[in-house]
Image (cartoon, helix red, strand yellow):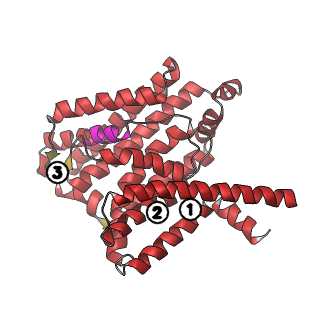
Amino acid sequence: MSLRERIHAVAGTETLPLLIFLGLVFLAFSLATPLFLTGANLRSMAFQMPVLGLLTLAMLVPILSGGLNLAIIYQANISGLALAWTLIQFGGPDAGIGAFILGVTLAVLVGALSGAVMGAVVAYVGAHPILVSLAMMIFLRGLGEFLTRGGDISGFPEFVNILGHGSLAGIPVPMIIFILAAIVWHIMLKRTRHGFSVYMVGSNIKASEYSGIHTRKTLVTIYAISGVICAIAGIVMAARFNSVRVGHGEALLLVTVLACFLGGIDPFGGFGRVLPVAIALIILQALSSGLNLIGANQHLSTAVWGLFLIAVMALRWVGLRWRSRQRKGT
């Protein structure tokens, strides 16, 4: 086996271009500013990325199935609101660990229920996922604004801050949560029957039905699991901001879609892996942090992200053409 074949076997063809870009981004910013590779900046990146990462994982599986979940931000916020409400009912800053566990359980149930409702409508009514998730997004936003009167809910116990600002063995707790979620996602997609069904449904839902896959059950499960990871993101956001507000993270919705496409997820479903998406998230965070350190306008990072997506697509196209010629030559 040649070196190129070994690299492809380990990293995958969609991962190699991202690793190249990751190295170039780190090299460029390390030369541009000595602050980029400092422990303080890398630690800051590790605290900032997990919320976007968790929301991206919530977006990933619906896209793999050929759908989309536009409600992820508001599922996260309404789940965080469920946690906040529980803590407030049990004394706010004086609430104990039991109240927190109850609040987390309620938050996860709210996220799962909102996702399951979307999945059921998509599966049994046949409505398009974009329309269904858009309707859920509007509903959850209105419900959240009604419950909070458009304001924030704050006043959590001190130990909740650990989830947003704490570290374990030098690794930020939010990053640990994201890594564990990514590992679970990878195992679910690659090692379980449900993961196989997700890819099959995304590739061809009619063929999946003929092959004996319970496509309706699969779709309901997909969106329910997406809701669960949204709830986890909402809990981390509540701990990071020490408050819950309906509008937290609104700007991240399109970035999650961008991260999925950068990570090689087929926009039509049926193909994609977790590892390339995780690398894409690191690149996006590095671009944002690097531009901030060199004093660039914060809005410039959005434009750079778009150019980066174009560059990655161009590099993949070149790679496909090159491999095609290699096969013809052999």
141 over 166 or under it: above or below: above
The quadrant in which the C terminus is found is: bottom right
- Give me the C-alpha separation between circle 2 and circle 3: 33 Å
* Image position of 318 (left or right of 262): right
Q: Please state the horizontal and vertical placement of residue 214, each as a whole percent of the image.
A: 61, 26
| Tag 1 residue | 18
Q: Residue at position x 36%, y 67% from top?
A: 291
The mark found on residue 163 in the picture is none
The amino acid type, in three-letter code, at marker 2 is Ile
Q: Are marks 1 and 2 in contact (CB under 8 Å)?
A: yes
Answer few, some or many: residues within 10 Å of disc 3's Cα (few below 14, many 20 plus, some between 14 and 19): many
Residue 318 located within the stretch drawn in magenta = no
- Select label 2 or label 3 by which is in front: 2
Crowding near pointer 2: few (<14 within 10 Å), some, many (20+)? many
Quadrant of the image containing the N terminus: bottom right
Left or right of residue 246: residue 93: left
Outermost right residue: 330
Q: Which residue is mark 3?
A: 156
* Circle 3: element type: loop
| Mark 1: few/some/many CA within 10 Å (<14, 14-19, 20+) | many
The mark that comes first in sequence, 2 or 3, is 3
> What span is in magenta?
72-80
Residue, disc 2: 283
Looking at the image, is 145 positioned above or below residue 265?
Answer: above
- Identify the residue at the far top of this view: 125
Seen at 26% across and 46% down, the residue is: 248
Separation of residues labelled 3 and 1 (CA atoms): 40 Å
Q: Mark 3 is on which residue type?
A: Phe
